[in-house]
Image: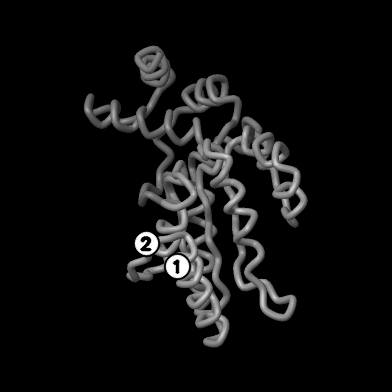
């Protein structure tokens, strides 16, 4: 959800070329190919060097057209290949006269911090870090209401006790809140429930375990 919101903010600005890697658990060669694909580049390249040349041409072309290229890597904690993480570091070397041609945004769960820290050279290249803390009980309720409105529902169909149960189970982690709410809505829809109560949420939790 965070990555989608970030993309929506940038998409309204014609000075950005954006690509998102939603499944980054790839080897370095396939990772580079996926970047080109997400940038809409359809050129055959049989080697890493050729891939980098194609990417460099695209970055320069964007710069000359007044655009900055941003690659968003979602679920970055799923990257297992250390060579892919090393490739990410090397991508930050795309510069022209001390001007960076590429911005990389890594979004992931808490273990991402440990993975980055394990590669000193990559860790040193991270310029901005932000850790999204768990939501409070009140923030959890506001967050659920916000998501419902985004989905077109103006009325909060989650009872107070249901939201308390959701917070108790999720500890305020947005990703888990999303999953539990989505499953609760699905079960509620299937049973033609008018509201989502704590019993329904508890059933969803029990069934998922």
Residue 143 is labelled as none
Is residue 172 shown above or below 125?
A: above
Q: Estimate the x, y position of residue 23 in percent, counting from the top left.
A: 42, 45
Is residue 193 shown above or below 126?
A: above
Nearest the viewer among 94 and 24 is 94
Nearest the viewer among 134 and 17 is 17
Q: How is the image coloured?
A: one colour
Is residue 64 shown above or below 161?
A: below
Please tell me which residue is depicted at 62% across the width and 33% down the height of the picture: 111
Nearest the viewer among 194 and 174 is 174
Left or right for 113, reference 62: right
Please tell me which residue is depicted at 37% across the width and 65% down the height of the picture: 45
Q: CA distance from mark 1 to mark 2?
A: 7 Å
Residue 46 is labelled as 2
Q: Mark 1, residues whose alpha carbon is within 10 Å: few (<14), some, or many (≥20)? A: few
Residue 50 is labelled as 1
Number of marks in picture: 2
Is residue 142 shown above or below 202?
A: below
Q: Estimate the x, y position of residue 112 in percent, counting from the top left.
A: 62, 38
Q: Mark 2, residues whose alpha carbon is within 10 Å: few (<14), some, or many (≥20)? A: few
Please tell me which residue is depicted at 73% across the width and 55% down the height of the picture: 125
Badge 1 vs badge 2, beta-carbon distance below 8 Å = yes
Quarter of the image for the C terminus: give it: top left
Please tell me which residue is depicted at 66% across the width and 33% down the height of the picture: 136
SS type, badge 2: loop
């Amino acid at each position: 959800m965070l990555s989608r919101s970030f993309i929506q903010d940038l998409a309204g600005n014609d000075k950005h070329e954006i690509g998102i890697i939603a499944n980054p658990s790839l080897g370095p060669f396939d990772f580079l190919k996926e970047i080109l694909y997400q940038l809409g580049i359809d050129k055959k390249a049989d080697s890493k060097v050729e891939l980098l040349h194609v990417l460099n041409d695209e970055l320069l072309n964007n710069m000359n057209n007044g655009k900055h290229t941003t690659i968003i890597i979602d679920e970055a904690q799923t990257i297992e290949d250390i060579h892919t993480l090393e490739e990410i570091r090397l991508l930050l070397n795309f510069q022209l006269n001390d001007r960076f041609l590429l911005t990389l945004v890594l979004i992931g769960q808490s273990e991402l911090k440990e993975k980055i820290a394990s590669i000193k050279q990559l860790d040193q290249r991270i310029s901005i870090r932000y850790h999204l803390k768990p939501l409070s009980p009140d923030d959890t309720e506001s967050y659920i209401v916000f998501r419902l409105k985004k989905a077109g529902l103006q009325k909060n169909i989650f009872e107070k006790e249901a939201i308390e149960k959701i917070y108790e189970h999720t500890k305020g982690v947005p990703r888990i809140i999303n999953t539990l709410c989505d499953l609760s809505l699905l079960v509620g829809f299937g049973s033609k429930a008018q509201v989502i109560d704590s019993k329904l949420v508890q059933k969803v939790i029990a069934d998922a375990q």
